[in-house]
Image (tube, coloured by chain):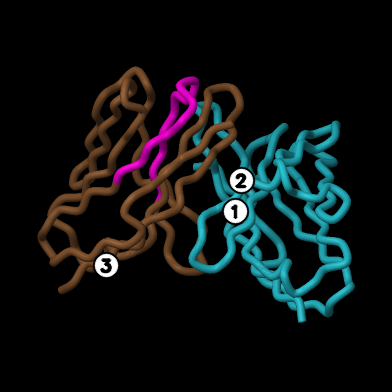
């Protein structure tokens, strides 16, 4: 089955700096890769996603890149703000199954 | 956007009792729903896929007799934790898929077993 690894587990950056979180997946059949932000005790919130037919996607300060050959994808947050502090999860899914396998999570702290 | 609700939002029960958690899709139909468990400072672990009108599909290592899933209608799935023990204390989250592979998550249910 699919396995998703995520690094780093914790990340501290100064406000205004960039943050990068990386994930690798094992199943080449996976073709949908969402990123979620989760605050303590709350549901995960989708912040950006990418499909396997695209190499990069950007939404304001957030971008995701996908390397299908290497089976890894990354989340990039630029100009970080204190409100970006949260736990971020990547996930991998196969179209048609709707099943998500989540990465282990990254706790991001943005220091003011 | 699509909304998924869960009830209750939190529950405290005694060891050995059973607890039922409801997951509803409020403005769309869901033939499939998913149940996740999240322990403190850990990731969301998929427990099972709930299928309307048929048996749930459980992930490896999840006891189907302990975590009973019923998907009785196109908008409701229930998870019953039977004979709950303190190690079952966790955050349980359901989700329902959209048409483009996205998932709509419920707000979660925090279960504490004393």
In the rendered structure, the colour chosen for chain A is brown
Q: Which residue is drawn at 24% across and 28% down?
A: A56
Q: Which chain hosts label 1? A: B
Could you say where residue A54 lies in the image, as x and y percent from the top left? 30, 21
The answer to whether residue B5 is above or below residue A92 is below
Query: Is B79 on the left-hand or right-hand side of A17?
Result: right
Could you say where residue B46 lies in the image, as x and y percent from the top left? 63, 46
Q: Which residue is drawn at 36% across and 28% down?
A: A71
Q: Is residue A32 magenta?
A: yes
Q: Mark 2 points at which residue?
A: B95
Q: What stretch is highlighted in magenta?
A: A22-36
Q: Give the Cα distance between marks 1 and 2.
A: 6 Å
Quadrant that contains the N terminus of chain A: top right
Q: Residue at x 81, y 41 (%)?
A: B71
| Mark 3 and mark 2 residues within 8 Å of each other at the beta carbon | no
Could you say where residue B10 lies in the image, as x and y percent from the top left? 67, 72
Label 1 SS = loop
Q: Which chain hosts label 3? A: A
């Amino acid at each position: 089955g699919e396995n998703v690894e995520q690094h780093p587990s914790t990340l501290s950056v100064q406000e205004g700096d960039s943050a990068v979180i990386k994930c690798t997946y094992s199943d080449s059949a996976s073709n949908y890769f969402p990123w979620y932000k989760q605050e303590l005790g709350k549901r995960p919130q989708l912040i950006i996603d990418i499909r396997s037919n695209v190499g990069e996607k950007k939404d304001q300060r957030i971008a995701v890149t996908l390397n299908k050959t290497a089976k890894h994808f990354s989340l990039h947050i630029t100009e970080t703000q204190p409100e970006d502090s949260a736990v971020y999860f990547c996930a991998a899914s196969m179209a048609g199954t709707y099943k998500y396998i989540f990465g282990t999570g990254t706790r991001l702290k943005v220091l003011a | 956007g699509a909304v998924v609700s869960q009830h209750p939002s939190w529950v405290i029960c005694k060891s050995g009792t059973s607890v039922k958690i409801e997951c509803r899709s409020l403005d769309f139909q869901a033939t499939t729903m998913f149940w996740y468990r999240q322990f403190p400072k850990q990731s969301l672990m998929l427990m099972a896929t709930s299928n309307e009108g048929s048996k749930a599909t459980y992930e490896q290592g999840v006891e189907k007799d302990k975590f009973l899933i019923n998907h009785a209608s196109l908008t409701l799935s229930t998870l019953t934790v039977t004979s709950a023990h303190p190690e079952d204390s966790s955050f349980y989250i359901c989700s329902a898929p959209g048409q483009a592979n996205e998932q709509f998550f419920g707000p979660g249910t925090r279960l504490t077993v004393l």
